[in-house]
Image (cartoon, helix red, strand yellow):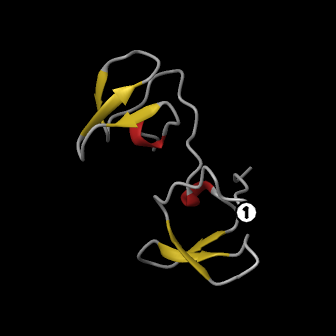
Amino acid sequence: MEKHSDCKHFISVDCAKGLCAWTNQMVVIDTPPCPRFEALPKCKICSNYHPDKDNMGTCTGLPDKSFWAYDEMIARNCPGFKANA
C-alpha cells in the first residue's frame, strides 16, 4: 500500500507528518497519497534489493555486491537503482 512518505513530493517535517509539495498541505505520513503520487526511489521498489525476513537485505546493483540496505532507504542518488517493473 502506497503512503505519503513513499511519494517524491513528500517533504518530511517530523516523525508523524510532512508537507505535500503539490497541495502545500500538511499530511500524516502513513495515510494514502493524493492522485499526483509519484514513487520516491526506495530500496523496497528496486529489483537489486534482496530483503531478509526483517526487511534488512543486500543490494546487488553496486560493484560491492554485499552492500547492506533496508526497505525504506531512499535511493534517489543510488547508481544501482532499478525500479521493479
* Image spot of residue 14 (x, y percent): 24, 42
Going 74% across and 49% down the picture, which residue do you hit?
85
Give the structural element (helix, strand or loop) at label 1. loop
Residue farthest to the front, as pictured: 77
Q: Quadrant of the N terminus?
A: top left
**Quarter of the image where one finds residue 4:** top left
Quick check: 39 above or below 24?
below
Q: Which residue is under mark 1? A: 80
Give left or right: position of 75 versus 9. Answer: right
Quick check: 35 above or below 81?
above
Give left or right: position of 68 versus 33. Answer: right
Along the viewing direction, whichever of 12 and 38 lies nearer the viewer: 12
Give left or right: position of 67 versus 80. Answer: left
Going 55% across and 43% down the picture, which residue do you hit?
40
**Quarter of the image where one finds residue 60:** bottom right
Quick check: 57 above or below 16?
below
Quick check: 17 above or below 47?
above
* Image spot of residue 72 (x, y percent): 46, 58
* Image spot of residue 11 (x, y percent): 39, 34
Three-letter code, disc 1: Gly
